[in-house]
Amino acid sequence: MERRRSLPDVLAGGIFVLIGGAFVVGALGYELGTPLRMGPGAFPMLVGATVAALGLAIVLKGLVAGEVIPFGPIPWRAVAVIVLALVFFGFTVRGLGFVPASAVTALLTTLASSRVRPLTAVAVAAGLTAAGTLIFVVGLQLRIPLLGPWLGF
Amino acid sequence: MELLDNLALGFSTALLIQNVLYCFVGVLLGTAVGVLPGIGPTATVAMLLPITFSFEPVTALIMLAGIYYGAQYGGSTTAILINLPGESSAAVTALDGHEMARQGRAGAALAAAAVGSFVAGTVATVVLAVAAPPLARVALTFGPAEYFSLVLFGLIVSITLARGAPLKALAMIALGVLFGTVGQDLYTGTPRFVFGQRELYGGIDFVSVAVGMFGVAEILRNLENEHTRTAIVGKVRNLWPTREDRRRIVGPILRGTGLGSALGVLPGGGHVLASFTSYAVEKRISKRPQEFGRGAIEGVAGPESANNAAAQTSFIPLLTLGLPAHPVMALMVGAFIVHGITPGPNVITEEPALFWGLIASMWIGNVLLVLLNLPLIGIWVRMLRIPYQVLFPMIILFAAIGTYSLEFNAFDVYAIVFFGILGYILIKCGCEPAPLLLGFVLGPLLEENLRRALIISRGDASVFVTRPISAVLLAVAVAALVITVLPAIRRRRETVFTEEE
């Protein structure tokens, strides 16, 4: 493998530094305590600093002698649609009820593939909603109303 | 014979009708996801975990374990037939297995894999039954200092076996431990990193982390380049290996079983290491090394036995120490806890029926796998025709429903989104997701034992190096870390130097 400056390394390292740093800053708000009685902030502070330090090392290594990783395309459409579908489910399952929330989520998700035909998408969504209802509500007695209060039930 | 009594108890539990049924469901699902590329056992177990909460604990664990070793099995089928290893440990099987299939000997390769896996599974189950009780007795003497060192040791050794850059794996573990601190502090009850949201007080659910990192992120990876799978598979004939084949696979199966049983105990990816090692060993001692890569049946039988044996013995650290060796095991730790059982050395004495029942079920599962795979091979091949456009919406929807049903908490669903995106970016940058999940599950254990050990020692941190077991574990962990990181540094420096010249 060829080794030189590597953008993925710098990006990954940056993420570690960011998240580790955020936890360290957050941990400052909690009591650190003494070694005998460590407060709630001590352990996250320690681990957060470790993550940030490792991230920094990855960034530095990435600038000098990183791994060359083919980054490849990003399927923006899939990312957007799947995020939307999951957030929609979490937001509406209580209000709309199981069936409408599942159907919309499934339909949205099928659209993540750029090759899907509308008819196939509807068929897949309908099939999955039916399967999901059968397995989770009928089979496993999940206590979610099929149709929710937002629809007047 | 105590062992026989224990096994009798185990089989009487495992042979209960609902346990056999769910063992069957487990290995069936496991084989299916092992065959299907794009969905692995970790995402499957994460999705099905909520379903198993309504079962008896032993039934739930039998099914989840079945998914795990069933997937190891299914992965080899596709590796042989279409050169597409469904699981990383089956990558070696593809080398010679697919070559055999192209020469029209797919049947012999599949049979060698099945027989090898069965023998290995049987032997490794006995190894598990014999080795687990003494190990659990040792573990019972462990105090918090030993446990802290043990967890740290497990986490660090798991990266030395993983592929990819050790620095990134280390950072992923630490990041996982960090995410594990979200929620109420165990000792003081202080809510940490919850942004004032009551829903986060219980912490981030590990099912969300697993589904996000292994389900959503993997789907996004697969959607980068959509291409239709063209699985052209000829008819499989002559399943029964010839007399010559039978003679040639005996040695590799036995050696693979031994290697796999030993390496499977190691934390992290032991089964992958086992199959690679077995292949290397068989090639080295073979009288016909030139045949390897051109359809040598030894190159299928050895690695397949090794990875199946390792899949069984990797339950040893889980059942005796409460240490998961694989992301699926990490999820099983969660399953234990949900059922009110702390995984660790106490399981064997407090829940003997569960412990021995799980072990016995593995042998039954192996029998079921042979029955499922050899006669029904055609069905599995046909499953490859399921288009991905149906598969991935199913994973997303069922993941959302399953995660939501855990606590009826919408935050758990949003957490899937967060970890899916984070996982996708990190995987794209060359970070493996498995260490993060292991760190996430073991993180709270690490913190709890660290704080408890320090309270007991009155704040004296030297307790970790003055207690012998703890000191040895830490020393081995440091040595493993140095060995993993050092060659990488040296090699990199060499590259830099040669570039400058």
Image: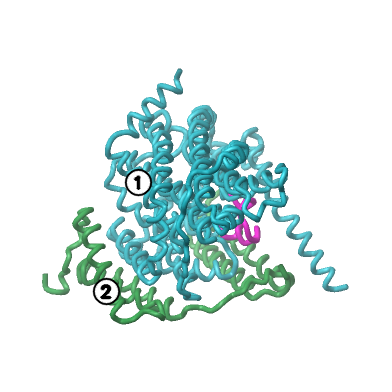
Chain colours: A green, B cyan
Parent chain of label 2: A
Amino acid bearing label 2: Ala
Amino acid bearing label 1: Val
**For this rendering, which residue is in front, B439 or B142?**
B439
Which disc, if any, is residue B338? 1
**For this rendering, which residue is in front, B292 or B489?**
B292
Numbered marks: total: 2
Taking B298 as reference, is B452 left or right?
A: left
- Tell me the magenta residue range: B155-174
Say if residue B436 shows up in the picture.
Answer: yes
**Residue furthest toward the right?**
B501
Which disc, if any, is residue A116? none
Residue at image point 60% right, 60% down? B171
Distance in Å between CA atoms under marks 2 and 1: 37 Å
Instruction: Give SS at disc 1.
Output: helix
Name the residue that disc number 2 marks.
Answer: A123
Is the magenta region chiefly helix, strand or loop?
helix
Residue B414 location (% of width, % of height): 37, 67
